[in-house]
Image (cartoon, rainbow, N blue to C red):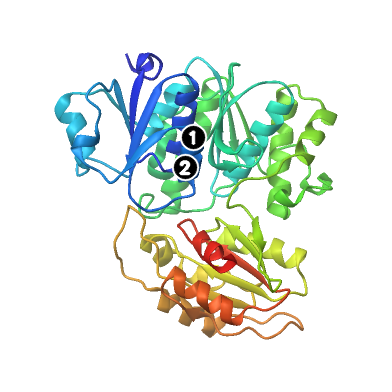
Amino acid sequence: MAQALIKTAQRIYCIGIKGVGMTALAEVLHGWGKRVTGSDTEERFQTDEVLRRSGILFVEGFAKENVPADVDLVIYSTAYGEKNPEYAEALRRGIPMLSYPEALGQLMEGKYGVAVSGSHGKTTTTALLGHVMTEAGLDPTVIVGSEVKNWGSNARVGKSEYVVIEADEYQNKFQHYNPRGLIITNIDWDHSDFFKTLEAYEKAFADFREKVLGNSGWVVETGKIDYSPSEVEGLPLSLSGEHNKKNTALVYAVAQKLGIADNVFWKAVQSFKGTARRFEVKGETANGVLVVDDYAHHPTEIQATLKAARARYPKQKLWVVFHPHTFTRTKTFFDDFARSFSDADQVIILDIYGSAREEHGGVHSKDLVAAINKGHPCKGTRVPLVDAIYIPTIPEAATYLRNHAEKDDIVITMGAGDVWKVGEDFLR
């Protein structure tokens, strides 16, 4: 019954369709010839354009009237439940329903599935693996948590037995996946609103690992492969930084398992254009300020991204516009966040982005600004750090940059929310 849902349903409605994973799944189902529609909030996301290019229709705003009369299946984002009017309407009408991770699990049933998991780097690693497999002629279906520049899409619809997914750990979505192979990029406590302790977080990965191995599958993880990241040379801009050398090494290890020749692998790596919001160069202003956007929203990710940026731009003034993502994460890792910006010269902190999960919660961006200013080190002979400042909104931050950023400065917008809009506004 469960397996038949994703395969037999022809008219599918997606609640929360603008989410990066939901968008990718919708693209795959649309590519299978199914009629896919959906809904989401009125907020503008980068996936809006991906959906439009794919010809997938969606409405903005949730209402029970949006659910089509003839729908076979409703797939819903785990951000929404019975309080959502469309979810409640589907329940009332007895329409078959799947959560996003349940649908993704069904996508891999009967296939050679590869799940890419980890606290950091899984989007880039998933995209790179999908690109390498594509260039090697393996024709995979791929689900990625960001637009892959080589495809102009969050997904790739293949015809082979291979299915590659980005496997998010939040809410322990792992329980729904049964892949043949598993990549673990790293394990670094996150999502403290769900995983209350480091031990609970680590257990989710340990259970996933054991499930895959128990089903005679394979696991590739950082620190346990016979390939040194230091051997990775000449990577393109899209793979800047030591962290991406490790990601590339993981993909190399999987390529070996899949029988992909070295020359094919390296040619594919060189042609990889990266993904949206992963050290993505957005453009340059008329007065010569380079704008870069990055998804970093955890202290470890911020440090890795800024370390790579400082190595690439050692003499330029480095601005960071950071949008803290969720009150729970900001509060749990507060001290780590305060120490994360040591490679920056100027830091702007926006109001915390609560997302669909939270509305408020025991910490404010002003607190983070004060902590950064209190203990932020100044490195080497670079210009001393200008105090971190609090600017609540995206338009105000863009205006501040227009008035203060100068020729040859680098501006990096960071966060899992919509901080990328600062760069768009500034570039205009």
| Screen quadrant of the N terminus | top left
Q: Is residue 274 above or below residue 67?
A: below
Coordinates of residue 390 in the picture (x, y in percent): 46, 79
- At horizontal 64% and vertical 42% (from top left) the residue drawn is 149
Direction from residue 239 to residue 329 in the image, left or right: left
Q: Which residue is mark 1?
A: 24
Residue 265 position by quadrant: top right
**Do residues under tags 2 and 1 come within 8 Å of each other at their CB atoms?**
yes
Amino acid carrying label 1: it is Ala
Q: Amino acid at mark 2?
A: Val
Q: Is residue 37 above or below residue 311?
A: above
Mark-to-mark CA distance, 2 and 1 = 6 Å
Q: Secondary structure at mark 1?
A: helix
Whole-percent x and y of residue 379?
A: 71, 79
Within 10 Å of disc 1 (Cα), the crowding (few <14, some 14-19, many 20+) is many
Q: What residue do we see at 26% from left, 23% from top?
A: 96
Q: Residue shown at 60%/82% (left/top)?
A: 404
Left-right relation of 319 to 50: right
Camera-nearest residue between 238 and 101: 238
Report if residue 187 is visible in the image. yes
Percent position of residue 364, x then y: 37, 73
User: Under tag 2, what secondary structure?
Assistant: helix
In this figure, which residue is indicated by the disc labeled 2? 20
Residue visible at 69% across and 38% down in the picture? 250
